[in-house]
Amino acid sequence: MIYDGHAYCFPDLQGRGGFADRAEFQRHVQLAVAGMGHTRQPWRKRDRAPADTGALADTSKGWTFDAIKDATLTSANGRFEWTAGGETYVKQLMPPSAANMEYCADSLIAEMDYAGVDMAMLHRTAYLGIGNDFVASCVRQYPDRIQGLAFIEPWLVQVEPDESIARLVEAIDRQGLSALQFMPMFLGAYEQYEDWDAPGFKPFWDAVSAMGIPVFFTLAPWRRVTVDAYLNELRVLRRWMEAYPDVVVVFTHGFSWRMFREGDAMVLPDALFRETPIENPNFHMQLVLSVTLGARWPYPMPQFKPAMEKLVERIGADRLMWGSDHPFEMVHYTYRQCLDQIRSYDDVLSADDIAAITGGNMARVMGLSDGREVRS
């Protein structure tokens, strides 16, 4: 079974994205376009000369609304445009085929069929919309091909703990979603700077643990964009797993790969493995590579092969999971290439390793039986 552990469907990014206030959603979109999470090279429209996003936000301030500058974004064909100093600038956030700035379940299934992918897990992020209704509708449309993650705004977990728990129960028990995605990098935008295992989060985490669902953690150095800040996020994850050792955890994207690229090599320091709770058998790591490294390393990315060998040695092929970040990876690779990239490492991965990484491990974690039936 080929299971893409990291894909997206999303509503029109020119709308409200599940937020009550469209302006709040658009602030998240502007931060993403500015480079918080998406570092693709923007260009000047009239001659396609390389440019920057300095007119959108001061990214040195971190993932905070305080970084946003006064600007107006327009969008179509998977890209955003803005004007500064009499010039128009462009950033291609997703493939040009996303003409209406949305990505529906029909489009995902067509790409999955063409690439030979059996199942996909829909992920979430604030700048692609937070509404559980939309993702649940995609799951209902293709229940034998798509599973979905619930999104509970992390900035509301301490402020509205009972409501946050109730919404998670609703998403899992009645809307048919399968697990939780938690993204602490958005806390700073709402001026919440405590670590996400602080006492104020405990009622929510206790409820999540009692529900017995997997948690997909998306981590980034959101207060200061440094290696030390990133290692601190890994320490929080370690403390969290020590408090909830029986919860199945998926570490989305894997390590922050771009931070550890040195020239034509991927250098993973021992500190990464020391701070990450890899000794817990419930810890799993995603390998989302083409979208994060494809701008520098073309397909099939042989530069990553030594790192893959090290990950198998330190973590084990039985806890690594392929993810595409589809459709965003198509700015660099095709969907099929994204999958074939893992297969191309057959001189460091056995056939069983490749089968496990490209689907078997996700299927097991998500309780699939015979490749189709979803755990009730």
Image: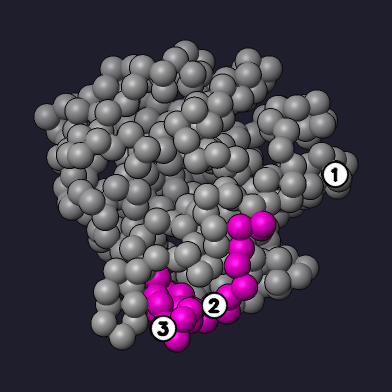
Relative vertical location of residue 319 with respect to residue 334 in this rendering, above or below? above
- Label 2 and label 1: CA atoms lie apart by 31 Å
From this viewpoint, is residue 140 visible?
no
- Label 3 and label 2: CA atoms lie apart by 13 Å
Where is residue 298? Give x, y as percent: 18, 52
- Label 1 and label 3: CA atoms lie apart by 42 Å
Magenta stretch holds residue 76: yes
- The mark closer to the camera, 3 or 2, is 3
**180 on left or right of 116:** right
What residue sits 41% from the left and 83% below the top? Answer: 87
What residue sits 54% from the left and 58% below the top? Answer: 58
Q: Which of 241 and 25 is in front in this view?
A: 25
**Pointer 2 residue:** 73
Residue type at the position of mark 2? Leu
Crowd tier of the residue under label 3, counting other residues whose Cα lies within 10 Å: few below 14, some 14–19, many 20 or above: few
Residue type at the position of mark 3? Glu
The furthest residue to the left: 347
> For the magenta stretch, what is the residue range?
65-93
Name the element at disc 1: loop
- The mark closer to the camera, 2 or 1, is 2
Q: How many marks?
A: 3
- The mark closer to the camera, 1 or 3, is 3
What residue sits 57% from the left and 79% below the top? Answer: 72
**Pointer 1 residue:** 159
**Pointer 3 residue:** 87
Where is residue 133? Give x, y as percent: 68, 62
